[in-house]
Amino acid sequence: MTSPLTQTVHWDLTYDVHLGSTWGRFMQGLREQKILANSCPECSRTFVPPQAYCEACFVRTQEWTELPAEGDLEVFTVVWQGFTGGPTPPYAVGGIRLAGADTLLMHVVTGLDFTDPATVREQLPHGSRVRAVWAAERTGQILDISHFEPAG
Amino acid sequence: MPTRARPGPVHVVGLSCTPLLPEQDAVLDELVFDAVSAALSECALRKADVGLSVLASMDVPDGRSISSGLTTAAAAGYLSDSYRLEADSGSAVAAAAQAVAAGDVEVAVAVGVHNPEHHATDDAGRRAFLEQLSNLAFEPAFDRPVGMTAQAVYGMQAAHAIRASGVTLQDLAELSAAAITRGAAGRRPGRRSPVTAAEVLASAPVAWPLLDLMFPAPLTGAAAVVLASPARAARLLGRSAVVTGTGQATGDHTWTGDWLTRPEATTARAAADAYRNAALTDPASSVDVVELSAPTPALHGPYLRALGLSGLPPARVSPSGGLAGGHAGLANGIVRLLEAVEWLETHEPRGRAVVHSVDTVTGTVSEEATVAVVEGV
Amino acid sequence: MAQRAAVVGVGITDATSPRKQTRSHVELCQDAVWAAVEHAGISPADLDAVVVGNIDGFEGTVLGGKHVTRLLGLGPHLPMVVLNTGGTTGGNLMQVAARMVRAGTHDRVLCLGGPTFFGVRDLQSAINTNSPMIVEQPLGMGGFHMGAFAASAYQARHGTTVQDLASVVVADHRKASANPHAHLRYTLTETEVVEGTPLSSPLTQPMVCPVSTSAAAMVVASEGVARSRTSPAALIRAMGTSSDPYLGGGKGDFAVMENLAALARRVYALADVRDPRSEFDVVEVFAPYVHMQPMQLEALGFCGPGEGIDLIRSGATDAGGDLPTNLSGGPKCTNAGVAGELAPYAYTALQVMGDAPESIQVPGARTGLAHGTGGSFFQFENLAVFSRLDPQEQS
Ligand SMILES: [Zn+2]
């Protein structure tokens, strides 16, 4: 088989992604080591990360609250093969239910021994308690929380 | 072609638009939510009443692949029927109208959003980014490497029109000046001050022979429309207009040259489709107003002819100023519909309007045109 | 005037890896389109419009579908609609085309899904751009990591083992080996699956779809057009889509496909399906990751929570079982992007028309269910119910 004729096509796009006031306020909170959530005035669900509107009731959210920086790990995966530009694997990403939140906050989870892939699930059972570890330098982005680690 | 029965009419019951600004400090979905929730409020409907949401947006300005993942819930699509077209919102209106005409839903929402994830301090910077995206939408082996962009296409088309049809740069400047001036007094001015033809001619060169004030100011925002079946609309407050027909057409590829020598052909096909669906046999004598989308003054005449509306008095051709003031990307189709319906409400409550929109992603190359016939009731 | 819509023509090309593919993107699309047009028994001049899908960022050209369509030899003036909803793009093409027909403004609309993943050098990094940036993507969460979340949650809920998951892969490969259009046509053992390269726990390489190249096309036409044919068509009896919010954290329970279950109830009601297990003769679901198929079978009402793998192991979903599912081998064995997403619809339509490849045709299939899913954390779902539409008696 002759090798196919191809041409290299490269995209070079740099974006300035608009945060808006809702996520802007959340990011400002992170700088101050606060995890801020907001709530729907109709169904009372509490969102973290906050949302500008409730997709179910289709109304603007109100009522900001600070949530504890500790919660239950409801789900996680260990990434053995990562992606270009991403963290170096292996690493674990999880969904954390902070007390009082109706959504999961996704974050990096530490405290796992990666030597044997077959044992990772048992190391952090469903509902394990984890707490946020703050980054020393905080610039108003999601990694102002460095990661979540097992609590207790 | 067998003779096809006309699709049933579809009522416009809610229409809304966010402020149109050079840049918005908002996430895309917040703009979508604002437009859709305001349009629903107009007719006192709630999310649960919406049978289908059709969104118009494009991944590259949105800065995310599958950007509809972010915006669908804001279009009232949470746990309900919805999809996203990468097309001008005029196409979204047509798709939403089809779902109502099909009897599949009683209420449908169409929404277009445009707020490129790019920060710039002036129009030139905003255009530079949109032009970069435009280049990426051109054919990759032949067109892209040689620098084809929407502005380049519009420049070539204008140059050709000047050489071939006898229109002069002065004529084009006068068209732009009149439209900008009209738009400056309108409800959604992209450019806030009246200008003279001399000022247009003195503005910065952009793509020869076209000058800065001959291109729309780049605007951002979201616009939404709520459509309903006649039966459902009868029980609703809100807007009183009917879409009696829509038509769509797509322009030809670069190498046939239609985009240069027959730029009106795509709009003409969309108009023929819309007029047939609306059973409109003599547009020249039965249309009161047209909201035209001419991205440059050199396309004003060709598009108007393609719609069969060259005879309309100038004051009834894009009374809003059309695109001369500004262009909100893919939100444009619904912005034009809003302007047309508002004009009918104010001037001819039982009148008939034609709404025309094109996408400007690759200029008149592969251009997508939509035409809708709208009547006051 | 409103009318019914049916699939009257389907074209699917053979699939292979990008490395072995000798046809270009455009050529593959041409092959699929001309096959669909021929199967429909029409000529390109009969078409009223094209609905084409693309996913920007995965392809070398923004709005790539627009370019391809003009190079297919269908004439320079066919109106085109470009659709992009990620993994549901393929199935939604048919939904948009069907609405155009059902509204009465169009009689024959072509749907085209090309080899979206053909050409991108680093597909994962392209897919990652749809992981929610700002709040989730910086955590190192990309394409299959989003998939792995549900697999992990499902395991935690039901005690599912990696061997259990592997059995689904084994079944998919067995089916794909019988489908001449499939990409991965080799069979595997459970051990080979379990011992595959770990990707994101609990998923190993064989549990995740391949990057394939192929194209698929369908012609959707009015009932009148469909009935005037000499062979059966696939009537679109019901269809729908449903969406979850954007962020992974807003999707409720990762161990249950609640969004799909809600959509299934809605679509079954439209089609008056009361007992899905006995009413469907054939099912094609979009399950690019191994855990998705059992979870989808549960959400679609074919078995109870946590029973999906047992259902697959029982042989019920094999050829000859009472619920033949993904006899094509599914996206687990062939996934070319939008073409792969259109495939469940294309194969299901072929099955009820009686025109599927002989080796995978379910004898006498009359009613079928097709499914699609995609978006960040598979937030989008779509479904359609097809029924065989026999030609009008010729007097
Ligand atoms: Zn709520």
Image (spheres, coloured by chain):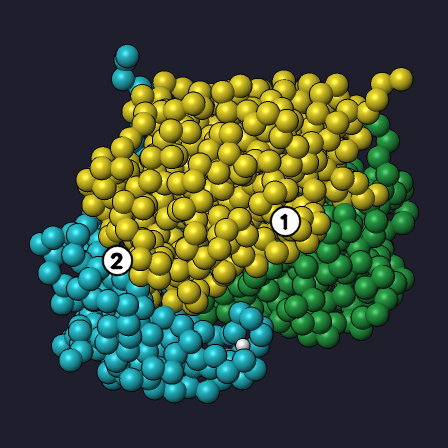
Q: Looking at the image, which is closer to me, C307 or C268? A: C307
Q: Position of residue B59 (x, y in %)?
A: 45, 50
Q: Secondary structure at mark 1?
A: loop
As drawn, which residue projects farthest toward the left?
Answer: A115
Q: Chain of mark 2?
A: A
Q: Position of residue B116 (x, y in %)?
A: 45, 58
- Is residue C179 shown above or below A91? above
Q: Quadrant of the C terminus of chain B?
A: bottom right
- Choose mark 2 or mark 1, whichever is in front: 1
Left or right: residue C308 versus residue C119 is right
**From where the camera sits, is residue B251 visible?**
no
Q: Label 2 CB, ligand 1: below 8 Å? A: no
Q: Label 1 CB, ligand 1: below 8 Å? A: no
Residue type at the position of mark 2? Thr
Q: Residue at x 59, y 25 (%)?
A: C363
Q: Position of residue B69 (x, y in %)?
A: 47, 57
Chain coloured cyan here:
A
Q: Residue at x 30, y 41 (%)?
A: C166
Q: Looking at the image, which is closer to me, C210 or B293? A: C210
Left or right: residue C345 versus residue C234 is left
Q: Which residue is mark 1?
A: C275
Marks 2/1: CA distance?
36 Å
Q: Quadrant of the N terminus of chain B?
A: top right
Q: Residue at x 25, y 84 (%)?
A: A32
Q: Chain of mark 1?
A: C
Chain coloured yellow here:
C
Residue type at the position of mark 1? Asp
Q: Position of residue B66 (x, y in %)?
A: 45, 51
Q: Which residue is mark 2?
A: A77
